[in-house]
Image (tube, rainbow, N blue to C red):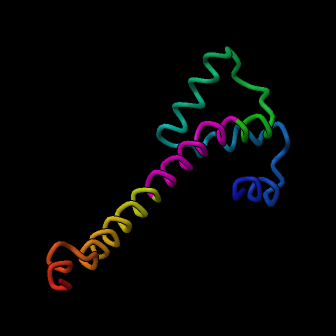
């Protein structure tokens, strides 16, 4: 959304938005965009909406999956800690023996 705000604020023409935005892509994002353009055999004429959808579809699912996986690992590690604390409070054979 920041790029869209920048493009609006600088009054970049509709036909120049993708060209300007793609110049800010770095690393894998840049490579991915260039590869897609090469595969489609098209070098210009992309709309802002198309560009935005392609970039989002390429990167947002991966980011969400990474976050979800990391969050699940955090929850699992907390459950292990809670589980081990609960296990130490669970009556064992010595508890039953002391009752008898």
- In this view, the residue in front, 69 or 9, is 69
- In this view, the residue in front, 36 or 64, is 64
- Give the percent coordinates (x, y) of residue 40: 68, 16
Quarter of the figure with the N terminus? bottom right
User: Is residue 69 on the magenta stretch?
Assistant: yes
Q: With respect to residue 28, does 6 lie above or below?
A: below
Q: With respect to residue 90, does 74 lie above or below?
A: above
Residue in the picture at 81% in, 49% down = 12
- Give the percent coordinates (x, y) of residue 32: 55, 31
Principal SS element in the magenta part?
helix
User: Is residue 82 on the magenta stretch?
Assistant: no
Quarter of the figure with the C terminus? bottom left
- Give the percent coordinates (x, y) of residue 78: 37, 68
- In this view, the residue in front, 75 or 53, is 75
In the image, taking residue 61 as reference, residue 5 lies left or right, namely right
Residue in the picture at 15% in, 85% down = 98
In the image, taking residue 5 as reference, residue 30 lies left or right, namely left
- Give the percent coordinates (x, y) of residue 36: 62, 24
User: Picture quarter containing residue 13?
Assistant: top right
Q: Which residues are magenta?
A: 54-70
- In this view, the residue in front, 13 or 57, is 57
Residue in the picture at 58% in, 27% down = 34
In the image, taking residue 7 as reference, residue 81 lies left or right, namely left
């Amino acid at each position: 959304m920041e790029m869209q705000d920048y493009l609006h604020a600088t009054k970049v023409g509709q036909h120049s938005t993708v060209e300007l935005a793609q110049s800010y892509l770095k690393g894998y994002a840049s490579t991915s965009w260039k590869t897609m353009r090469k595969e489609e055999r098209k070098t210009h004429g992309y709309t802002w909406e198309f560009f935005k959808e392609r970039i989002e579809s390429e990167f947002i699912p991966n980011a969400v999956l990474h976050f979800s996986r990391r969050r699940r690992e955090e929850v699992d590690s907390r459950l292990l800690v809670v589980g081990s604390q609960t296990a130490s409070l669970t009556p064992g054979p010595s508890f039953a023996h002391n009752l008898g």
